Each structure stands twice: as structure tokens, then as C-alpha cells.
Amino acid sequence: MILGLSLAPGMAVSQSKLNYGFKAGLNFSQFDGPLQSGETYRNNAGFHLGIVVKYFITDLFGVKGEFMYSQKGGQYRYEGPSALYLQQAIPPRLVRGNRFYEVDVSNDYIDIPVLGFVELGLVELSAGFNVGLLAGSAGGGQFEFTGTEPITNSLSLNLDHRYLSDEVGETVGTESVSIQIGNDQVTIPRQLGAYYEFSEKKSNRYRALDFGIVAGASLFINEGLFVGFRVNYGFSDVTHPQMDIDWSTFDGNYPSFNNDVDHQVSYQVSLGFSF
């Protein structure tokens, strides 16, 4: 009993070094990398939520780890000269013209950031690294095309992409639209999968692993409640080079690919509680 009483203060000190909590909030994400003529990247919005475990090395400094579900991605747009291979035509033919292609990509990650932190009064500053595991990847948007060689009527299609499961030439649903080529009328599916215009699928479009750095600050409203802001910058190329398409240049009947590096950038605003 005496031994137990003598150990109790030490145990209490040890336990007080650990701090647990949770957080949730919004992500504003986009891709960052070289752009070809006609290409643009824009932000999209998602959310994140998860748990936080902190260990105080001193009263002011420590390390923390998080286990988060986080929606990232971004909006990709291409507008300019392009082509469209009409596989349904008899015979199949390549039509050159102008393309508008816009897709909002939502990539779901399991993020595991590990950070060092320092507390300065009500403010906590933190920085470290993050490992992101891709759990889901989808996209939706609009595709419009007008042929000039030969001249065709305008075509408007929907994009419904499932980057982890779609196959080459895959479409969604049974609805279709028609395009006029001279005296011929060609029927095309209205909703296109992620790899509809690909000749082969060498891999999924987005890589399974992302690695980067994180830095941010939190303001404690009281002892437990806090609001935070964080920047997450990925060092990895999130797109596979053999699946990073270039809509302005075609190799035969199919679009070419870029061998560039696209980073994932995410800005997070959180509300959390620690206890």
C-alpha cells in the first residue's frame, strides 16, 4: 500500500503528458504543377474529421499524431484545340475541333500527420510531415466538343469518373446523344467513365500514396475548444505519368500524356476539442 501511494504521484504526472481530442472542418484543395496551353487548376471544397493524440515533452513543447479522413482533389479544366475519336462511327474516325473539358476531382485520403508543436499562451504552432493513403477517387463534370475537321454539330456530355474502378471505354448508364458528321449520324453515350478515351489503362490516374509537409496554428478559445488553420503541401506526384493526359496533342487516335509532377495542396480550417 505504501509503495502504491508512493508511485501514484509519478503515474499522475505521466498520464498528464498525454492529451486526446478530435477535430473536424473544411478543406480547400487544388493541384499544383506545370500547365499546358488551355489548362487551368482551381480549388474545390471538401471536409476532414479525425482524432488527435498529443504528448507533452515539456509544459510548452511536444509531439502529436492524428488519424484523419480528408477529402482533397481539385478542379481541372481544359479549353482549346483537341480531337475526339468516334469509335461508334462506321468506319471509326478521328474528328478534330475544339474541346471544353471540366472535371471536379474528389480524392478521399486517410491522412496520418505527425507534428511537433509549441504552445505560446492561447496559440499553438505546429509543423511536421503527413502520409496520405488514397481510399477513394471520383470526379464529375462536363465535356463539350465541336468538330471542325470535318465540321460537326456541338456535342455536350457528362463526366462520371470512378478512377479506381473504371475501365477503358467504360460508360455510365444507357442514355446517348447523336452527333452529325456530314450525312452520317453517330450515337455516343451521354455519360463517360474516367478512361473512355484511353487506348489502355496502365494504372489508375491517381497514386495510392501521397507524402508531404504540414504546418499550422491553433487558437484555444478555452482550455479545450480550439479553432485551427493548416497548410498541407504534398511532395509526391499524385498523378501517374502514363495516365496524366494532354488533351491538346493526340498520338494517332488517342490523346498524349504529360511527364510532369502534380502536387496536392490543401488548406484546412478546423474546429476541435482536446481533453
Image (spheres, rainbow, N blue to C red):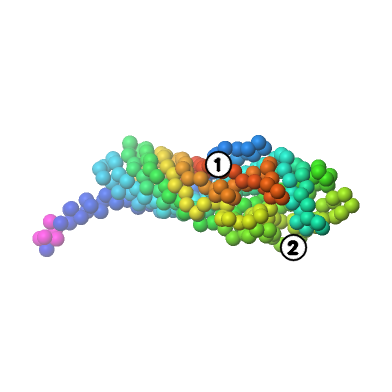
Span shown in magenta:
2-6
Identify the element where label 2 is drawn: loop
Q: Which mark is residue 241?
A: none
Tag 2: amino acid: Thr
Who comes first in sequence, dot 2 or dot 1?
2
Is residue 22 visible in the rendered structure shown here? no
**Percent coordinates x, y for residue 272 in the rendering:** 42, 48
| Magenta highlight on residue 87 | no
Q: Main secondary structure of the magenta part?
A: helix
**Percent coordinates x, y for residue 176 in the rendering:** 78, 58
Q: Disc 2 designates what residue?
A: 174
Q: Quadrant of residue 57?
A: top left
| Magenta highlight on residue 3 | yes
Q: Is residue 85 left or right of residue 44?
A: right
Is residue 154 visible in the rendered structure shown here? yes
Q: Disc 1 designates what residue?
A: 260
Which residue reaches farthest left? Answer: 2
Asked if disc 2 and disc 1 are in contact, CB closer than 8 Å, the reply is no
Front residue (pair 7, 33):
33
Tag 1: amino acid: Asp
Front residue (pair 46, 235):
235
On screen, residue 33 above or below 46: above
**Percent coordinates x, y for residue 196 in the rendering:** 68, 55
- Circle 2 packing at 10 Å, graded few (<14), some (14-19), many (20+), is few
Quadrant placement of the N terminus? bottom left
Residue at image point 61% right, 46% down: 257
Residue at image point 30% right, 49% down: 55
Residue at image point 47% right, 52% down: 209
**Percent coordinates x, y for residue 16 in the rendering:** 26, 51
Which residue reaches farthest right? Answer: 183
